[in-house]
Image: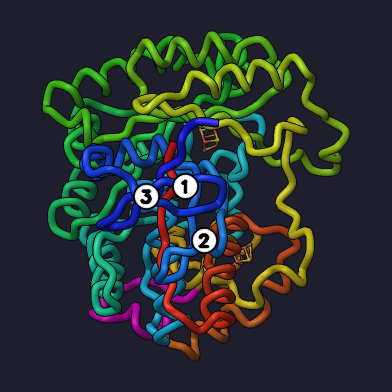
Amino acid sequence: MAERFILSNNSVRKLINGRIVRIDEQTTASLNALTKKQKAIRSRGIIIADAQENLIMQIDKQLGQHFFPLSMIDYANVAYQNARNGAPFPIISVDSHDVLHCDFACKDCLSGAGKNIEKACNNYNFNLPIELYKHMLQEISNYSTKRGFHNVRFEQSGEGNPDLYKSRAKLIEFAKQKLGMGIVYVSSGSKLDNSQLSSLVENVDFIRISFPGISPEAYQNYSGQTSFTFKDSIKNLEKIISERDKIGRKETLLVGVRATLRPEHENEYLPFVRLLNEVGIDAIQLSKVLIPDKERVDAHPLKQNEINNLLECSALSNSYFGVQVPHDLDFLYYGRVIDKNTDFPVTCYSAHIQPVLAGRDLCVCTKSDVMYSSQYSFGQFTGKKDEIESFLSPENFKKTTRDLPRACSSCCSIFDNLLVHNVVTLTKMLNRDLQFWEMIE
Ligand code: SF4
Ligand code: SF4
């Protein structure tokens, strides 16, 4: 196994056989100089230790991209402050679903290319004039600043294609330059115009381009359209990388790709990953998709050949290029079933720290049946100053989430919820000072 180091805000140590040990000054200086992006690429999990640096818990998860530009440490610290000092939760991340239309018709799209929500919600909610949208972000930012958290992570992933929001460039500029948010943009990139692309490259922390398929044939087959091809998407990436490097943001803008495991991809993983490496992409996430309805996960085992290919892809990771493959290389799909209800928190922490914007509504979470249900909306933004305080007042929070997470048989934020739950439980149980370190390889 590669050497493992652990980093906190101001110290660096090495992890050797479950012990935290000090290291020489030169290595410390070079690891302290790593940028956020380099840390995210090399992230392998989190260490919880006591004040004397005795290891208490090690969580091995390669999820740097999932949290970027935040990290697991931000989540752990917020949970710790709440459990240790009774500090109220700030919002640390918000995922915005702001567009209802898509030019793709992906076979396994959870939003039905934006159509599912139309059936459940008032369409008007998705009429988002830029001034109202800016107000919504300002409210979220103010709410968190008052609770000691700055730089809220703002992810835009659409409910359709986010490229289609016409004021995107202005919105991103406002969120970054006025509010100091950490910006994540997730899209196929098929409808990016030049002004959007420039604004993204100048202001965003993480651009993640989704590939419905990782070969020209699979891309066409799964995207359900023919006007934007696999080749077009690669060209888009080349343009993003070239513009990024031209304006000197190579070290601050993470450009990643997400693609899913599919039966048709069996022999395509390695060529795809090598191609993206040549293009200059920083990080690739190859993940499982949710098992299609009425099917069983264990009916779709991964073949040995696929496992070998994925492991070979993962081995191409280095300090500048991260390839993340599923933690369990067992089945092609995953279920989000909560295995043991007894191990799951009785509170949905995710609703506290990372609620979701669905049009004008601030909702509990991103899982379709929750997000599409008005009973799980904390409130709808109208433009009134400080309205978010009533949305998230203790009474309204309790009322809105009263049957959650009990009512959830599966969870869309299962790892995040369990991370916060573990930290809260440990903090209360041990009743002593703890510290958190990011583990990198
Ligand atoms: S690009 Fe995204 S929103 Fe559009 S159909 Fe595909 S999965 Fe759905
Ligand atoms: S699925 Fe349930 S437990 Fe999970 S984030 Fe949503 S509301 Fe919370």
- Disc 3 on helix, strand or loop? strand
Looking at the rendering, the quadrant in which ligand 2 lies is bottom right
Indicate the quadrant where residue 391 lies: bottom left
Report whether 202 appears left or right of 73.
left
Query: How far apart are labels 1 and 3 at the CA level?
Result: 7 Å
Residue in the foreground of this view, choosing between 352 and 109: 352
Q: Which mark is residue 15?
A: 1
Whether pointer 1 and pointer 3 mark residues with C-beta atoms closer than 8 Å, the reply is yes
- Give amino acid for label 1: Leu
Q: Position of residue 288 (x, y in %)?
A: 65, 35
Instruction: Tell me how far mark 2 sits from mark 1, CA to CA.
Output: 9 Å
> Disc 3 to disc 2, how far (Cα)?
12 Å
Question: Quick check: is the Cβ at mark 2 less than 8 Å away from ligand 2?
Answer: no
Task: Kindly identify the amino acid type of the residue bearing the numbered disc 3.
Answer: Arg
| Horizontal arrangement in the rendering, residue 254 relative to residue 228 (left or right) | left
Q: Position of residue 302 (x, y in %)?
A: 77, 25
Image quarter of the C terminus: top left
Taking the view exactly as shown, the residue that stands out farthest to the bottom is 395
Any magenta on residue 319? no
Q: Is 242 situated left or right of 144 in this image?
A: left
Quarter of the image containing the N terminus?
top right
Residue 387 drawn at (x, y percent):
32, 80
To which residue does mark 2 refer? 55
Residue occupying the point 42% across, 16% down: 276
Residue 271's disc is none
Residue extent of the magenta highlight: 378-392
Viewer-closest of 101 and 173: 173
Which residue is depicted at the point 56% across and 46% down? 17
Q: Quadrant of residue 433?
A: bottom left
Mark earlier in primary sequence (3, 2): 3
